[in-house]
Image (spheres, rainbow, N blue to C red):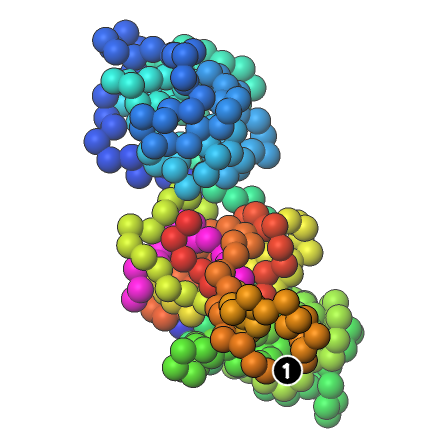
Amino acid sequence: MKTATSQFRPAIVLGLAAGLTLALGTLPGVSAQESGRTMATATGIPLTADAPEQYVVKPGDTLWDISKVYLREPWYWPEIWYVNPQVANPHLIYPGDVLRLVYIDGQPRLTIAERAEGGTGGRKLSPQVRREPMSRAITAIPYEVIASFAGKPVLLDKDQAKNAPYVVAMRDDHTLGAAGNEVYARGLKDAAADTRYNIIHVDGKLRDPQNNDLLGYSGTYVGSGPLVATGDPAKLLIADSSRETLQGDKLFPETLEAPTDFVPHSPASEVDAQVIAVRKITVIGQYQLVALNRGSAAGLEPGHVLAISQKGAVVRDRFSKGGLDSGMAQGLTFGKKVQLPAERSGVAMVYKTYDKMSFALIMEATHEIHEGDLAGRP
């Protein structure tokens, strides 16, 4: 299996704002501004109309949520985040931290004004060692969303589908597996007893619409259960089942670390990608998982925010010559063809990339997202 460009680490790193390493406090030129503050028109940074001077981070917040408190376009976060060297782990935000919007030389900057006391109260900044676990840090998107994708992959890279452990046979000469049945699996030689696995049936192929290259596969969750005997083959009990298990179905650990150490930001160069698959997720309703036909080879990386647009239809202009009776011939094929413009339908954030393919989450949508939709710089 190819290694994704994101590493599975539990805390989000917020250090994309290059050069912002001065300490805040009593520095000249650092102040909150009332007049013209909410627009920041001279800077080009799209602050929200009601961006607060101060915000206390709440449990359950995500970096996307906090970004939207201050920015009309959350992918501008690296432009306003100000790293304060007085703070232990200055790139991390925790529940209870107090964020403050200030201006430095006329530029809006967001900094940590107070660190949380045990995650509930606040105290003034001073050099300190943080005792709370790193896993409490605010992540870009909810951890459980990404974790569900990792354990129950419904979109798979082609190498992932090829190399994952698989069901080789059913016990007692069964041709199909169901809840209560035992199955034999290969590829789990070093797995520990009682480790739980999800069973995924590999479905259709995902191809690049531009050159027909095979990029990956779609998958369907089948069931799950623990290993009851180790070895090669190992034996797994199907404890839960949503449909029949077949020989060749793939196995993925039920619990996997999930990538959360990325920050929403816009790609540095233009992106010409298309949506090649869409899967709705039931864990948290607002998210949809999409596969794109571009990956790290095209410059994509976790945290990149892309605008999703529906292709404009091709229509015939039957009125270009001023005709008033063209409506009588709507079924006819005369008239010059006109390509309607693409219309934005949502915003997606890349969370995992391979060489020629990437997975992204739909963060916002105004219209339904479809296969074939375009993805580019927002």
- Is residue 167 part of the magenta span, yes or no? no
Q: Nearer the viewer, residue 202 or 299?
A: 299
Q: Nearer the viewer, residue 215 or 233?
A: 215
Q: Is residue 290 visible?
A: no
Residue 193 % position (x, y): 59, 66
Residue at label 1? 332
Is the residue 249 above or below the residue 124 in the image?
A: below
Is the residue 226 above or below the residue 72 in the image?
A: below
Q: Residue at x 30, y 23 (%)?
A: 107
* Quadrant assignment, res 114: top left
* Quadrant assignment, res 329: bottom right
Q: Residue at x 27, y 23 (%)?
A: 85
Residue 303 placement, left or right of 66? left
Task: Please name the amino acid that badge 1 sits on.
Answer: Leu
What segment is highlighted magenta in the picture? Answer: 297-311
Q: Nearer the viewer, residue 363 or 221?
A: 363
Residue 169 % position (x, y): 64, 87
- Is residue 310 part of the magenta span, yes or no? yes
Q: Residue at x 58, y 30 (%)?
A: 59
